[in-house]
Image (cartoon, rainbow, N blue to C red):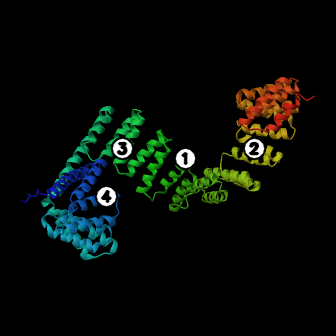
Amino acid sequence: MFKQKTPDNSHADSHDGSKNSMQMAQAAHQRYLLHSSSEDLTSAINFYIEALKNNPDTSSAYFRLASLLHDNGQIGIESAIEQCRKAVNIEPKNPNAHMYLGYFLSLNGEFNEAREHFKTAIKLKPFASSRTRLVLALTLLEKNKTKGSSFADFSSALYYIFSGSLLFLFDKASIKMFFKNVADDISYIKHKAFGEILEKTNNDVVAYDVYANALDKTRNKSVFYEKMAQIAIKKKRYSVALECYQNAVALSSGNPMSVVSAIEFIEEYYPDKVDELIDLYTILTNQTPNIPRCYYELGHLYLKKEDKMSAINAFKIALEQDSENPFYLNSLAFAYVQLEQYDSAIELYQKALSINPDNEWSAVVAQTLAAIYHQVKDNHEAAISMLQNALLLTKEKAPIYQAIADIYYDIEDLDKAIEYYNHSLDGDCNNPKAYSRLAMAYWEKDYIEKAIIYYSKAIDLDPEYDIAYNNLGVIFLDGLGDAKRALAYFENAVDINPNYVLAHFNIGRAYEVMGQKIEAAKKYQVALNLNKINPEIESQMIEDMLYKLFEA
């Protein structure tokens, strides 16, 4: 007895599954084309892949999937061509497969083969070939532009434009998509206009709801998210605005205008979101790689993160595109300073100065360069020369005079230091630091009375100037032997800055001179303890003073 075989329905089930997946994929694909939703994009891709798993011979899934993946940068053009060839091999009489293959071949510059596939698509379905004819026309025009002018190709392009436009009325798919686009555009215009009217009449809350409602009804979601963000800013709901801008960037597929709007908002309201700003500028550089300003801003963001190498690389790219930009040169030089690559920095600063876009700006750069010569290279002559040049460039001469005076003070040319501190005060008579430095120079020359006058002036201008109080106390203690008066100034310094090690040490010295050894010992001990946390002087010096108090 023979057993009856059970029919194998697995093939039929796979075919049905593929058909259902294709229907779902095409619906999501159309929604994506209308609304540019990342969710619809993901759904369409997943359903096309599922359709191919169920039935690898589903030709339309290959070219439609290739189109989505390529347009969104997930595969290259060679891969897209390969997928479309599979579709043509599986179903040679599918006009859409030939049209998509022709399209990708034209993108790859293979115009002759592309033309053949477009013509095949037209022959297979002549009355529904509107899109194919129009794409072929664009391909012929592109070939003319890149390969050289050809009258025959140009005439053919005009023919296909005319015939494609005429046959539009017979192309159901084009008509269907056209009316869907028209309906979407009308919905977009309606919501946008209504919302803007409400905003102008100060009905921001209602306008916000209109824009929010438009998100599910139009493809221009990024525009409406930006509108919502602007209302949120007016209402000072900055966290809501931030979320809206983030959505606008994501849904616009990194549209430069949306990215710039998000950057401007974050820079104003959330400047500490450095990582997010870096991400946005990176998107911007990917979309507009030939705008050096983007790399310049990226470099400064990396500096904020103390990612010095990334900053240098960003500034270098900016300079590759605009090699004579003094601001980019200056920023790259600054980044090199952070890495202590001073020779490279000096070279770049000098080049920036030679371009000199603005005298005041150049004066600031010259001061920076002078500081490197003085503090790093120990080249005082070059530093002073650079500052003398800066004097010729700027109206704000006082800080430069002070910088020159500081150099002369450091190399112990006190007469020159005093001369330039006085020049500085001629331009800025309310600068307590300049008075304090001038007083110190006079103290070094034993002009005690002048030192007292100028330290007192510094204190009058800045009653919280702890260093001036301490130094004035030193003059009374060591110069005039007036420990009691000195003590008052030291205590003022400690009141202002309780962690001022040197002032505590000097209080101990004053008490010691006054014969109050116990109080002196206490203060020396305080100074010793603080000095371990914030070293200002040699600990051994404090210990020697402390032990000396109780020597026989």
Please identify, in this view, whether the residue under mark 2 or under mark 3 is nearer the observer. Answer: 3
Identify the residue under disc 2. Answer: 423
Q: For the residue labelled by badge 3, is the local secondary structure a helix, a strand or a loop?
A: helix
Which sits in the foreground, 100 or 378?
100
- Looking at the image, how many numbered discs can be counted on the residues? 4
Residue pointed to by mark 1: 305
Considering only vertical position in the picture, is 76 above or below 418? Answer: below
Amino acid under disc 3: Asn
Residue highlighted by disc 4: 69
Residue 359 in the image, given as x and y percentages of width and height:
62, 52
At x 32% / y 60%, what residue is drawn? 70
- Name the amino acid, label 1: Lys
- Are the two marked residues, 1 and 2, in contact with CB atoms closer than 8 angstroms? no
Residue type (three-letter) at the residue carrying disc 4: Leu
Which is closer to the viewer, label 2 or label 4? 4
- Which quadrant would residue 78 be assigned to in this image? bottom left
Query: Does residue 229 appear left or right of residue 513 in this picture?
Result: left
Circle 3 is placed at which residue position? 247
